[in-house]
Image (cartoon, rainbow, N blue to C red):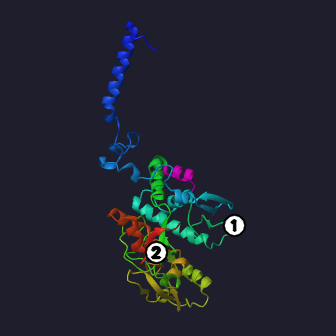
Amino acid sequence: MVDIKTGSGTRRVVSAALLLTIVLFFLPALIVRGEPVYQRKDTDDLPGGESAPPFEQSPTASTAGARDRGRAVRLLTKEGYVAELTMADYLWGVAAAEMPASFEEEALKAQVCAARTYTVIRQNGGKHPGADICGDSTCCQAYIERSAAEARWGLNAGEYGEKIDRAVAETDGLGILYNGQPIQALFFSSAAGKTVDAAEVWGNSVAYLKSVDSPEGDEVPNYRTQVELGAEEVKSLTLAAYPGADLSGDPAAWFGEASRNDGGGVISIPLGGVTLTGGQVRALFSLRSASFTVAWNGAQFIFDVTGYGHGVGMSQYGANAMAKNGSSFQDILTWYYTGAQVGALW
């Protein structure tokens, strides 16, 4: 017990009482309503000084990507071994490998959703024993390890890596559905004004893989390319694959008139009396797409080609053009996949 009659004791009691009064007086001001102080984000961290959204509207470090991190993917690597990854980490590597990280974030989100959906289809019936999917883009989807991607990006590694982190986390578990089921979410690099109906490429009609307008153009690197081949090379390549073709006589008469789709792509074209699809000619002569014209100049065949890829599904450069014009990733996906919806896969 303090002796309040002593000078020192009296001073201690008065000091304690004064401190208690100050605390009680300012206590209401110390109670912060809404977001706690330690959870605020300075507006200087946001582009253009925008106001930060309420904390609870953004995923926290412990919940971001929770659905994807709860699923595993068995990846057959290019080195031939099977690596088990979380879906989130796998999708990061696919997005980094398949789409330029400089693209708009909504385009990256669309890419992640397409890759996630494609992966689910592979997991439900893949072709690699012991693995769900491989890292070869000519077979399944491209994949790159984070360290390799960051080394490739150099000074942009931090910015690009965080963009893809957000694209994965903010689409957590989302995919593309048609009649409630995951679709074959095919994608390619760039289109020549329109995507291609799946029936033109593979002969089978798919309800959600129809031809639609695609807004990219000459801003795409190597959007227009040219391939020059001599008559003997064309003859050799053609007869090796199609021995029934007649490539005698004037080379100017070897190719017939092409049948074209609304976007100018080749549906079919006669070559030495054998009718080939645009995709077959593309593969035969290593063209970047089936949107081409061919002419004989007296010495060589000149193929003028527009775009890159098979042309079915989502155009990556088209997605980026849409995102630059304000489209969300949902807008992009439902545009390129006719009649499809964006929804949770799990």
- Is residue 93 in view? no
Please give the name of the residue rendered at 34% of the width and 33% of the height, measured from the top-left corner. Answer: 27
| Mark 1 residue crowding within 10 angstroms, few (<14) / some (14–19) / many (20+) | few
Give the image quarter of residue 234: bottom right
Looking at the rendered structure, the kind of residue marked 1 is Gly
Please give the name of the residue rendered at 50% of the width and 60% of the height, measured from the top-left corner. Answer: 95
Looking at the rendered structure, the kind of residue marked 2 is Gly
Q: Nearer the viewer, residue 333 or 257?
A: 333
Say which residue label 1 marks: 130
Which region of the structure is painted magenta?
144-153
Counting residues from the start of the chain, the first of labels 1 and 2 encountered is 1
Q: Nearer the viewer, residue 244 or 104?
A: 104
Say which residue label 2 marks: 313
Q: Is residue 296 magenta?
A: no
Q: Magenta stretch: dominant SS?
A: helix
Identify the secondary structure beneath mark 1. Answer: loop
Q: Which mark is residue 325?
A: none
Closer to viewer: mark 1 or mark 2: 1
Identify the secondary structure beneath mark 2. Answer: loop
Residue 168 lies, with reference to residue 292, above or below; the image says above
Q: Position of residue 242 (x, y in %)?
A: 59, 86
Q: Position of residue 126 (x, y in %)?
A: 63, 72
Q: Nearer the viewer, residue 176 or 15?
A: 15
Mark 1 vs mark 2, CA separation in Å: 28 Å
Q: Nearer the viewer, residue 202 or 86?
A: 86
| Mark 2 residue crowding within 10 angstroms, few (<14) / some (14–19) / many (20+) | many
